[in-house]
Structure formats: C-alpha cells, structure tokens
Amino acid sequence: MRRMLVLLALLGACASLAPDSTCPAQCRCTLNSSGGTIARCSTLDAAEQQFSGNIQRLEVSNIAPQDGWLNTLEDRLFVDLGLSHLDSIKITNTSLKSIDINAFRGLPNLYDLDLSDNNIVIIDPDTFEFSAFLHRLVLAGNPLKPDVSKYLLKSESLTELDISRCNLSTITPEMFSKLDNLIFLNLASNYLKDIGHFWKYKDFEFVEELDLSDNQIQKIDTKILSEHSELVTLNLRKNLLQSFDYVDIPELEDLDISQNRFQEINANTFKNVPEVIHVNMSYNQIHFIAEDSFIHVPNLKHLDLSHNKINGPLPVYMLTKNPDIENLKLSGNKNMKVFTGEEGLSGQHNNLYILDISDCGLEVIKSNSFQRMENIGTLNLSNNAIRTLDADVFSRLKRLSVLDISNNQLLTLNTSLFSANSELRKLIVSGNPLMNFSPKLFMHVHRLHYLDASHCQLSEVWSFRDAAFMNTHKILANLEFFNLSNNNMKHLHINDFGSAHALTTVDIRNNPMSCTKHFTELIQWFISQEIDPERQKNELSTELLDFDNNDRAVEKSIEWKEVIEQVCPTSTDLAISVKKFKNVVGSETIKVIEEEPKQHKKEMTTETTNTDSTLTLLIPGVDLGDIFPANESPEQTEEDPKEKGEELLRYYNIYGWIYWTFVLFVFVLLMAIINLTGALCCRQAPARPSYIGPVGGYVRTKNDGGSLYYKLYEECSVPNTPIVKNKTVVLDFNQFLKKPNAYNIVKDIDTLPSQV
C-alpha cells in the first residue's frame, strides 16, 4: 500500500512537470509550486510561436548567438506572443543587445525583470515608464554606457535596482533622479572611485540598502550620507578605504568594511553611527585597537575582527560599553598570542554566545579569560599552540554547547575539565597528540552527541576496565557521532561502544587495525545496531523510496564491507562475501553467500579457513564457526548450512502464511467486537454536553460566536499508525452510530488466503 501511494505521488509530480500541449515549439511549459505556469524557451519569435493559456513566468537563458536567438526585443513582442499575463521575465546570458522602448508594453502585471549577463549597451530611459507594478530590475553583467547627463531610468514603482558588474566608472545625481521610490541599489563590482556628488541628490533619501562592494573607493566624505536617514545597510567590502572616522549615517545598523586597508580603530571610527549593530572589519591590516573604540555603539551585537594583525592581549575596556555583544570573531590574528590580561575584559557580557579565537597563536588559556562571559555557547579555540588546559578553565561556562579545541598541542586532558559543562553537545579534539582518554572526562557531559577524536595518537578507545566503568555509569549514552579515524588503534571491541546506546555513525578508517575475530564481531554488531560508517563519496545509493529493514541491513553490510576490505585485503585462495541478509520469521536469519567456482574450493585447506583473516574477510559480520565447525573440512560441511536454511525457508513458506493469516483474522474479529460493544455502550449512556459537532456535521462555536480550539498539528511524540502491507481493515464507525444493529467491515478479500 505504501509503495502504491508513493507511486501515485510520483505520477502526480510527473504530471505537474509534464510539458503543456499548448506550448509552442522550442518551449517547455510546467507548473510551479505556487500553481502558476512557467515557460522555458530557447528562442522567441512572434511569427512562429504563439502561447495559449495563462503563462506567468518566462525564462530564456544560456542561448549562444549561433543558436538563432534574436538580438532585439521588438515592439510589443510579449503581447504578440500571447504572454500578456506575465509577472516575471528572465532573459539571461544571451546575445541580447537592444530593447525597443515599447517591448514591455501591454504587460500590466510585470513585477520582476531579470536581464543580467547579456550584451545590452544602451536602454531607453522611458522603457519602463508604463510598467506600473515593476518592483525589481536586474541589469547586472551588461556593458552599459548610459548618458550620465540624463536620468538612467524612469519608474515610480521600482524599489530594487541591480547594476553591478556593468563597467561603470562614473555616476551622477541625474542618473537616479527619476527613481524616487528606490530602496535597494546594487553598484557592486564596478570601477567607482568617488560617490560624493551623486549621493547628494535630495530625492535619493529613501534608499535603505546600498551595495558599493568591490570598487575602487578610497575615501568617503564624512557628511555625504548624513541627510539620508533611511540608510540601514552599507556594504563597502573590498575597496581601498583606510578610514571611516566621522562618517555620519545616523540610522545605519549593518556595516561591512572588510577587505579594505584599515590599520587601526579609534574612538572616532564609529562615532557618528550610534545605531550600528553589525560591524565586519575582517581581512584588513588592523594592528591597534583603542580602549574607547566602541563606546559610541552601545547596540553592537556582532563584531568581526578576524584575519587582521591584532596583538594581544585585547584592551581591558574595549567592550565595556557593549553589554549586548553576542558574536565576537577574532580568528586568524596570528600575532595575538594572549587573548586577555589577568583581569579579562571589563564589563558584563552576559549575551555573548559565540566566541571565535581560533588560529591566533594562543599558547595559554586561563579561566579568568572568560570571566563575565558565562553564557558562551560556542567556543572555538582550534588551530592554536595550546599545550595544556587547567581543570577549571571552562568552569565559568555553564552553558557551553559547542567546543572546538582541535589542532593544538594537547598531550592529555584533565578528567575534571568538563565537570561544569553539563550542556556540552559537540566536542572536537581532533589533531592533538592525545594518546588516550579517561572515561571520567565525560562523566558530566550527559548530552554530548558529537565527538571528533580523529587525527590523534590514540592506541585504544578505552581499556577493558574503563569500558565496564562507562557501562555502569552510562557515560556517552547519548553519543550519536564518534570519529576515531586516522589514529594508531590496532584493536577494537564491542565493549568500547557498549555504553553508547544512541550511536548512529562511527568512523574508524585509516587505523592500523588487526584482522581478528573481535573486529569481525564488532562489525557484525555495528550492522545489527544499524550504525553507519562515515559516508564515502562512492557510497551506495538507496533504492527509490524503499526503506524496508532488510534493505537497510543489506546497505549497511555493503558500506561496512569497504571498511573490512581495508583491514583484511582480499585473499587469492578464498573469496566469499556477504551478498544479502534476509529476515524470514522472528529472529531466524538465512545467510546466503556467494561462492567461487568449485575448483577453487577443492584447493582450499583446513589451515586456511582457521586463520583470523579468513574469518574477517570472507563473511563480514558473520561467525564462520556456524558454517565450518572446528576440526572439519569445508568439503564435509559446506552443504549442511545451505540445506538446513533451504529446508527452514521451505517450511515457513508453506506454513507461515497460514499462521499469520489466522492471527490477523483473530485480531480483526476482536477489534470488531470491541468497537461494536463500545458503540452500544455509547448509545445507552446518558447524553453529555458536546464541544464538537457530530461526525461529519458542522463546527460548533461558543455562545459569543467565537470558534472553539482545535488542535492544529500532531505532537511529535505521537507514533505513526503502523502500516500492514497487503491487508487492509477499515471499520466504519459512522455506521455504528447511525445503525446500532449493524456494522460494516470492509476487507481486502484478494489478499486473504482461500483456506481461511
């Protein structure tokens, strides 16, 4: 039944994506998720094409000149094509060069127009004068050569204009004089050096977001933006700025001045942007930060100073006036060496949640470094030179959830290191010369679900005694992901993972593992617990929408086979591999193996089959003792398991369906009796006030006319209704209520055996 429903859903999806018969040649029409129709064409020609139906979106993209694409959008082209209902047009990456002034006439619903990456040089300023609902226009990537003495475009409705990558070197106030309602302007990736004179235009005050990134701007006039109180977001990334001192933008909230040439930050840098919340100054050359640099921006929440040349420790009073700081990024300042002084950072930073001081050349981290930062949730200390961590270094961080201390020089971790971090969920310690773990290290991190200990020098996960201790105290009981790859481990045992009851993924690749029976048993346990190895690039793709338990077991055996082949290379004398695991009844499992030609079997010796490598390689996850008993040759016993399995399978095939049919019949009969009894009892019970209408009736309301509360969604804890394949039982409860002496039971007769 489930497969049939899935098939119907796929057929419906395919039908919605099927080409419309009303589409002309060289076009394909499909329905989008919102119910409108999209036409994708390789050319437009009113003489040979005619659309019928309500086409809302048109797309023509990636058409080479030799493919016959017209270079011009002619007068009323879209109306002549029968596309008068368009609200979105996308013509990109073609050889389009010119546009007739009336090309978009007769399109009253046109809202979004994308003409990017064409060869448009000149566009008539009045082309969109009568497009009353046009809000977004993209001309990016065209070699525009506008007349800078006139207005670029005339539109009262346009709110977003993108003219990035248009080779513009000069802009004037007149160019935007007829765009009174513009909110977003993108001038990125041009050759602009000065924005002073154009921005002074008085009617340009409604712009809220301005993108001037990737230009050649060296200086900004301090008062040029002061009268434009609506500007909220300013992007000046990747320019040649050396100073932002005294630039007056009273309502600015988001400022990006990364990838410029700043060398210092002082009290005047943000003096006239008092409302700023986000500041990005990454990838500059900043080596000095004054104590009072951020006193004028009390609302600052996100500060990115990564990849500069900042020397440590940070100034004590640097963030004293910024109690709302939430995200502080300092990564890539390789000369910092020391994060803070003995006093830490002055002020209360209870809202600081993310702190990134990775790749800063840090050698020592002390507990006072995080004082007044008790609510840090994510801490990144990776890629430093830290050799040791004091037992109380994280004791203040009660809400620490993610900790990355990878790629340092840690030889050991104090067993009390995380005693105060009960909220820790993700821990990364990879790339350290750690040789072992103590289970006491994880005594208090009961919520840890992700642990990466790859690229260390671990020779074992836990000792036998440690494994028993972990099981007793349920240590790492919620661990889901465990990365142990690229270590020095030679032996692994099931006990190493026995306490991790929630484990779903284990990566043990690239370890000098020995091919032993314990390793085989471990892989068998991984498969039985549905634990995945780390996914490979050439991982097996699952069958389309087929998620039976048997199929999952087969998939995992194949995935783990790749790990087995690394540990136990293929033998030239004997090659037996797992082909399929198939559940028959209850816990009985038939193991089907694929064998080499018989001439190879005759050459096998008893000594070969007794080696550990044979046990591991030949049937990963299966004990070959069940197939080849001790002191017996393969020739004497190889047929017994197969014959026994076939006999067991034959038995269940003959009698199993009778048993399950009888059980199903009894279950259905009991359910019918219970429902009938319940219906009769309900009819004899005294009437009670009802808060909902009768089944199939109207919706009840309150006395005051308001609607009653109804549950809008299912609780996550409610289990899904189990699906019984090929056997459907439907009880018509409405019939019980309407006809007390009759009930209706509908069965799928075709699926029941004739013997019942």
Image (spheres, rainbow, N blue to C red):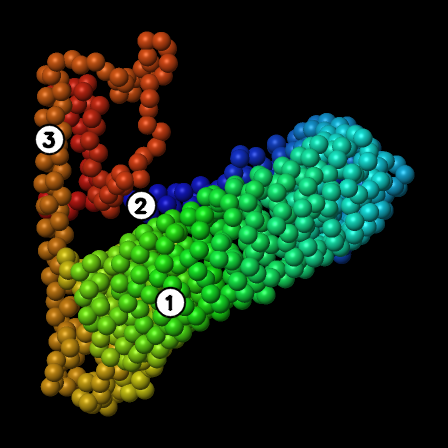
In-front residue for pair 599/239: 239
* Residue that appears at 12% across and 70% down: 644
Name the amino acid, label 2: Arg
Q: Residue tagged by mark 2?
A: 2
* Residue that appears at 68% across and 41% down: 271
Q: How many tags in the picture?
A: 3
| Placement of 311 over or under 710, stated as above or below | below
| Placement of 201 over or under 495, stated as above or below | above
Q: Secondary structure at mark 2?
A: helix
* Residue that appears at 48% across and 44% down: 348
Residue 710, given in percent of the width and then of the height, sits at: 33, 24
Q: Residue tagged by mark 3?
A: 674
| Placement of 423 over or under 476, stated as above or below | above
Circle 1 or circle 2, nearest the eye? 1
- Real-space CA distance between mark 3 and mark 2, rounded to the nearest whole angstrom: 27 Å
Q: Secondary structure at mark 3?
A: helix
Circle 3 or circle 1, nearest the eye? 1
Q: Residue tagged by mark 1?
A: 453
Q: Tell me the quarter of the image containing the N terminus.
A: top left
